[in-house]
Image (cartoon, rainbow, N blue to C red):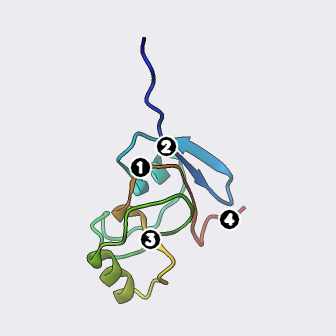
Amino acid sequence: MYHAIPMPTVRFLPKNTGIEVPKGTRLIDAIRQAGLPIARACGDDLICAKCHVEILQGSVTREAPIETDVKARNQIEPKFRLACAIRVHDDLTLTTTYWGD
């Protein structure tokens, strides 16, 4: 008997939309797949920090030193994470400053 492997759900607030993605999907790719805008100037190379999001629920891997350095250099608040640096492994709820109602 075949059992489907459950996929994590990524929810986007305040849009209150969500999508399921395969485990290991880059968060920035999930955001694009959902049709939401995501700021980026570096081509997803962990340089510009414009793709910062706030994880409201769910767990992600600990921030690597390179991400911490990029955020500091670009004056991004510590509460934010870079969508290009995160892989989705569990359900997440997130937002960013430019997703309006």
Disc 1 and disc 4: Cα gap in Å?
A: 26 Å
* Neighbours of disc 1 within 10 Å: few (<14), some (14-19), many (20+): many
Tag 2 residue: 8
Q: Residues at badges 2 and 1 in contact (C-beta under 8 Å)? A: yes
Instruction: Indicate left or right for 8 with 71 as reference.
Output: right
Residue type pointed to by label 2: Pro
Give the residue displayed 47% in from the left and 82% down from the top: 78
Instruction: Indicate left or right for 99 with 76 as reference.
Output: right
* Neighbours of disc 2 within 10 Å: few (<14), some (14-19), many (20+): some
Q: Quarter-wise, where is residue 98 in the image?
A: bottom right
Secondary structure category for the residue under label 1: loop
Disc 4 and disc 2: Cα gap in Å?
A: 24 Å
Disc 2 and disc 1: Cα gap in Å?
A: 7 Å
Q: Nearer the viewer, mark 4 or mark 2?
A: 2
Tag 4 residue: 100
Q: Nearer the viewer, residue 93 or 37?
A: 93
Q: Nearer the viewer, residue 83 or 39?
A: 83
Q: Residues at badges 3 and 4 in contact (C-beta under 8 Å)? A: no
Disc 3 and disc 4: Cα gap in Å?
A: 19 Å
| Of the image marks 4 and 2, the number of the one nearer the N terminus | 2
Which disc, if any, is residue 81?
A: 3
Q: Nearer the viewer, residue 1 or 80?
A: 1
Q: Nearer the viewer, mark 3 or mark 1?
A: 1
Residue type pointed to by label 3: Arg
